[in-house]
Image (cartoon, rainbow, N blue to C red):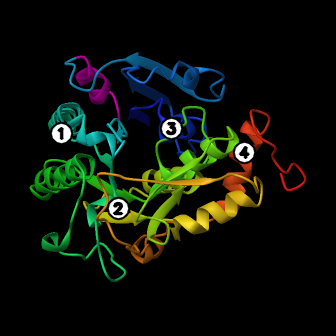
Amino acid sequence: MNICITGALGHIGSHLIRNLSVKGLKKVYLVDNLMTQRYASLFDLPDDKSFRFFELDILSHEIDRVIKDSDVVVHLAAVTNAEESFKNAELVERVNKDGLTHVVELCAKYSRPLVFFSTTSVYGSQEEIVDENCPESRLKPQSPYAESKLYGEKLIQGLAGRGKFDALILRLGTIFGYSVGMRFHTAVNKFIWQAALGSEVTVWKTALNQRRPYCGLNDCVRSINHAINERIFDNQIYNIVTLNLTVKDILDTIKAYIPDFSVKFVESKIMNQLSYNVSNQKSLERGFSYSDDLSGLIKETLGRLGNINCEVDKQNL
């Protein structure tokens, strides 16, 4: 089996390519345009797999031959910073919509199954726990990023529903956990970074006690391996969520290792998003599993940052 991974050097991709456990795997095609300059994600790759790197934009016609020679496409390439997406709407449009459309059209052309990564942010503000049966009329994406992911879901289900190709859509909670290509603009990782540097931890004013879905990086990668091995290309949507947390839960966990950091409350363009809990029951019933631990992944990340600016409780680490 040959696998094509777009956005292969990013936060999820750089961890996935080191932890692929797919039956019959022959070649792993890594596609990334290096826009975020994560060169280090290519260092020290496992020797037991055959990797080939393509420095390509997903809108390039050259990606055609890569997808044609692949048995599965894992589409991770995307602009992912929700708050910054308000300022980068044109880039979001180009990458998350036009780029995805190009990849989807090639998957349809060659009948290649696709794993697409959406986000639980498409749910937006909800008063009750929500699952994949939430009707479209109740979905409330509150950023260009989240809106682009909902666009992708509709595009894929439309073509897959007409038998053009098979697909799987995974709505991820906010990712946390260490990787070589790690990003730091999402809640858990941003708080760890700021606390480890001895800086003020910046929290949106309305967010402290809001509950939202999160996904551990190992659980995310485990879901990809499971989906490919079990051929779960059923054209359905699955929430991939380790647990639902408040910002206070996260900060309290970091304080076990860095007791003295201070918090600064700031404004955000995504201020009206209230608490929402997301169910992972459907994915559990399909054999997906979750074992990541918030404290454990915070501990691992701080262990790699703990000798920078601030004092970390190394006994706890």
Mark 4, Cα crowd under 10 Å, few <14 / some 14-19 / many 20+, is many
Q: For the residues labelled 3 and 1, say whether their Cβ atoms are less than 8 Å apart.
A: no
Task: From the image, tell me which residue sits under label 2.
Answer: 120
Question: How far apart are the two marked residues, 2 and 3, measured between alpha carbons?
Answer: 18 Å
Disc 1 marks which residue? 97
- The mark nearer the N terminus, 4 or 3, is 3
Q: Is residue 80 left or right of residue 184?
A: left
Is residue 67 covered in magenta?
Answer: yes
Seen from the viewer's position, the closer of residues 235 and 197 is 197
Measured along the vertical axis of the image, is residue 77 above or below residue 83? above
Select label 2 or label 3 by which is in front: 3
Majority secondary structure in the magenta region: helix
Q: Could you say which disc has been placed on residue 302 in the image? A: 4
- Single out the mark in the foreground, 1 or 4: 4
Asked if residue 121 is positioned above or below residue 40 in the image, the reply reads below
Nearest to N terminus: mark 1 or mark 4: 1
Given contact means CB atoms under 8 Å apart, are the residues at marks 1 and 4 in contact?
Answer: no
- In the rendering, at what x and y percent does residue 62 appear? 24, 17
Left or right placement of residue 160 versus residue 316 in this view: left
Q: Residue at x 17, y 36 (%)?
A: 93
Q: Which residue is mark 3?
A: 183
Total numbered labels = 4
Q: Which residues are magenta?
A: 62-70
